[in-house]
Amino acid sequence: MRKIKDYFRIRFNNEDIVRMNRYDGIISIAYYVYYLGFIYLFGLFLFKVGPNIYIFDFSKQFSKFIFYIPVAFLSLLPLGVIIRFRKQALASIGIKKDKILRSFIFGILYSLPFNLPTIIYVLFHGIRINSNFFDLLWLFLYFFICIAFVEEVMFRGYIQTRIQTIIKNKWMSIIIVGIMFAFMHVPFQMLKVDMSFGQFLLYDYKHLIITGLLHIYFVYIYNRDHQILAPTLTHALINFIPNLFV
């Protein structure tokens, strides 16, 4: 019988780690550098080239979703090539068919600590729900596919599992990848608010710290079943629920 404290442990899949080596850790860092460069160039394209590049009306959530699908694809394309080149299964990054229903349920449950305070606040203050069903549907798909799925596969499914071939200490590897996860948001966001790197760190350091801590939470969720669906759904709902209300 499992002890209560066992439910709060982060348990890595040691069988997968044994099958990997230091090259996987080095490649994961190279992939991270690629993504930083890619997202920075995308930010330059959006915010520095000029407003004429907005060929989609972002007031329509469908247009936003369609616009970001190629970005999500280009973000994960090198990862697909790496996995194939290294002859590793998609299951090694959490993409698998088993435990889907269980992961779906737990994905919802693990989002509640973050979303319940928002829901309770809304109920007590009479804030109405956005009634545009299709806008909400496309907005959820945007958060689920273009944001949560990309980031969960990248950081929890891939980088975290490979970095352990270089950094053997479990908690040190989690903290370092958490810092990498937080820092990943900087290039795009600093361009969005038109700040220098130093200015943005001072402006957004609290949010960056929270983002780094969220990595620990998502790693915990992922390592329950080594199934990417649960943290992806939790991640998407944390982003989506506040947008239900107007």
Image: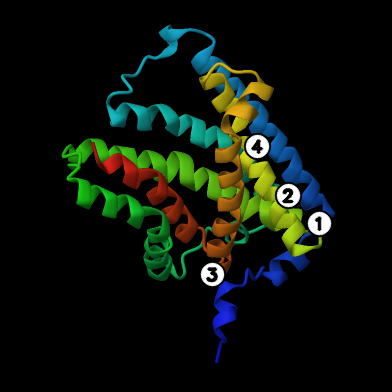
Q: Is residue 193 above or below residue 176?
A: above
Mark 2 vs 1: CB contact within 8 A: yes
Q: Residues within 10 Å of mark 3 (few under 14, many from 20)?
A: some
Query: Disc 4 marks which residue?
Result: 183
Separation of residues labelled 2 and 3 (CA atoms): 22 Å
- Percent position of residue 112, x then y: 38, 60
Q: Is residue 39 visible?
A: no
- Percent position of residue 122, x then y: 24, 48
Q: Secondary structure at mark 3?
A: helix
Separation of residues labelled 2 and 1 (CA atoms): 9 Å
Front position among marks 3 and 4? 4
Q: Is residue 39 above or below residue 98?
A: above
Separation of residues labelled 3 and 4 (CA atoms): 27 Å
Query: Disc 1 marks which residue?
Result: 167
Q: Residues within 10 Å of mark 4 (few under 14, many from 20)?
A: some
Q: Is residue 231 above or below residue 146?
A: below
First reached walking from the N terminus: tag 3 or tag 4: 4
Query: Disc 3 marks which residue?
Result: 225
Amino acid at circle 2:
Ile
Separation of residues labelled 1 and 4 (CA atoms): 19 Å
Separation of residues labelled 3 and 1 (CA atoms): 22 Å
